[in-house]
Image (tube, rainbow, N blue to C red):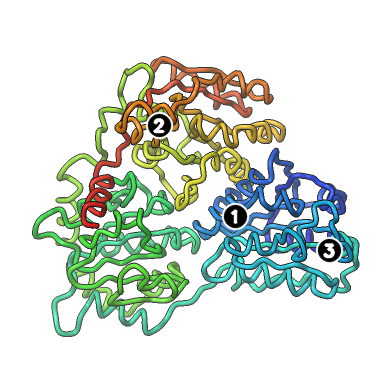
Amino acid sequence: MKTTQYILDALKAEGADHAFFVPGGLIDAFLATLSSTEGVAPIVAAHEGGAACMADGYAKASGRFGACFAIGGPGVTNMVTAAASARADSSPILIISGQVPTDWEGKGGFQDSSSAALNDIAILSPVALASLAIENIHLVHHHLRECFTRMLAGHQGPVHVSVPIDIQHGEVSAPWVPLDESVHHPRFADREGIERLWKALLPADGTPAKRVAILAGAGVEKSEATDLLIDFAEQFEIPVATTLRAKGVFPENHRLSLGVFGYAGHRPAIDMLLSNAPGAEVEVLLVLGSGLSQRDTMYWDTDMLPSRAMVHVDVDPTVLGRTWQSEAPVVGDCGEVLKRLLNADSGRRADLAASNSERAAWVESVISAGPRHYDLENTDSDAMPLHPARVVKELRKALPRAGVLVSDSGAHRAFCCHYWESYGPRSYFSAANIGPMGWAIPAAVGVQAALPGKRVATVTGDGCMLMHGVEMQTAARYNMPIVYIVVNNAALGNVWLRASQQGPGPEGLTLLPRHDWAGFAKSLGLEAESVERPEDLAPAMERAFASGKTYCLDVWCDRAFKTPVTPYAKAKQSWVDED
């Protein structure tokens, strides 16, 4: 069959039912296939970077992978930032780029970005797990399979394959053979690691650990292990904090939920994991699927190291010991590890459960010691311009319980992370690790494509809108009922908060005009309105969600409100001072 059809058949066979792209000469051969392959819906983006962000959002929301197409050269360079963000978040996306015919390479052909010219392969190599060029028809099967395997195995991330025009028109002799299910969902756990885990919990020469806590990362979400995590936590009265990337993987209204730990985290999680309660230090910390990055550790604060042992579970052995050495490293899938803990022999389970009442009292003492949120009164603020915390509260009330929030990068993300309550996995999405501005606007298109039955809301800012705001028209063109909320504070919010302390010169560099984003959205085919008064928020959101259409709310907010990141800011200052 023709190479283009072979590639689309492979996408379909491996579970992708959407493909995101911007048409261009070097992928003309794919257009007929994209428009006629049943089961793979094509979505045309406004910008190649937007298409890659859509693929990223789709991958995060579906639990599978996202696919995007672009021409070589400018199309590929436009995708680099989105690919880097996917790499940082371990998000599997497949980038397929077109290339000039192989016999043009290095001859000065228009948009030649082969290895003999601009070299797309080298451009994407630093941010992709694999970046390959198919320069022989006999390599189509091999290189595509290599990309799928590298994209999905262990530490997931973006991959790239470049397909020259002559190869696109070529014939592949055999049909695509689907990958084994174990490639998509590896289920393994190091047996010796499991034994080390149990020895940390139940040492042979000491008393069983009573103060045990869990920090759940994205690995729990990737292994579809929320139910197992809830079961394990409830059986042994173990409290659970999550990283920002994994927000919602443990229901935040659960009695054992500590909330988010790290950037914009919640008071119970920070107090417990940093042992802010004297005499109640964590004895064993079970880290599930987190790489223990700067934001996930409050600037690598060693106060979160437990008194007895840190158990670190991850499918990627390279992250074990990267930040701190673990007394009980476990290479394995988080779901499989939890399953084996739950299925352990009855004696071990009984010994761990023997201290349930003491653990429950410990958890209750931390949770009841103060409010969950910092500055909670701001969620009821009647300030004008509006307080972002009030915006988040009204949005949570307006969006159905099973609704999904996509949060962009900026000051608004701190408000969303802190004040938004998530009740399940894949209900809160953000480019957590490098934070590209504007990511959420196109990513929401991918999220909605992956979750067609869910209501999707996106919180973004005016700085983000300047970067990717035009992708709202993609959502409108495909009749996606996404509600975009623009926190319009006429500034680059987070940067302004810092620059305003440095004087009028630096401050002036971070200010923006008060753009009419509602008018802009209407010009792109959305329904839209501006909101300036707090009492108008709830009815405006009700209209937006009732419309069933792509909708933009341009919400006028004050840039001067500080974000709820005080403990994180103190940790940052301590780190700087110690240097």
Circle 1 crowding by C-alpha within 10 Å: few under 14, some 14–19, many from 20: many
Residue drawn 86% across the image and 65% down it: 102
For this rendering, which residue is in front, 491 or 238? 491
Q: Real-space Cα distance between discs 3 and 2? A: 52 Å
Provide the residue designation for mark 2.
392
**Tag 1: amino acid:** Ala
User: What is the three-letter code of the residue carrying label 3?
Assistant: Glu
Residue at numbered disc 1 = 83
Around disc 3, counting alpha carbons within 10 Å, would you say few (fewer than 14), some (14 to 19), or many (20 or more)? some
Q: Which of marks 3 and 1 is in front?
A: 3
Cα gap from disc 3 to disc 1, whole angstroms: 25 Å
Front position among marks 2 and 1: 1
Mark 2 or 1, nearer chain start: 1
Mark sitting earlier along the chain (3/2): 3
Q: How far apart are marks 2 and 1 (CA)?
A: 29 Å
Quarter residue 214 falls in: bottom left
Left or right of 131 on screen, residue 497: left
Image height of 102 relative to 201, above or below:
above
Q: Is mark 3 on a helix, strand or loop?
A: loop
- Left or right of 423 in this view: 562: left
The residue sitting at 51% across, 45% down in the picture is 436
- Earlier along the polypeptide chain: callout 3 or callout 1? 1
Image location of residue 448, percent across then percent down: 61, 42
Secondary structure beneath dot 1 equals: helix
Say above or below: 371 vs 176.
above
Instruction: Give the mark toward the camera: 3 or 2.
Output: 3
> Residue 347, can we see it?
no
* Disc 2 residue crowd, few under 14, some 14–19, many 20+, Cα 10 Å: many
User: Could you say where residue 352 lies in the image, as x and y percent from the top left?
Assistant: 23, 72
The residue positioned 48% from the left and 25% from the top of the image is: 512
Question: What residue did someone put label 3 on?
Answer: 105
Image quadrant occupied by the N terminus:
bottom right
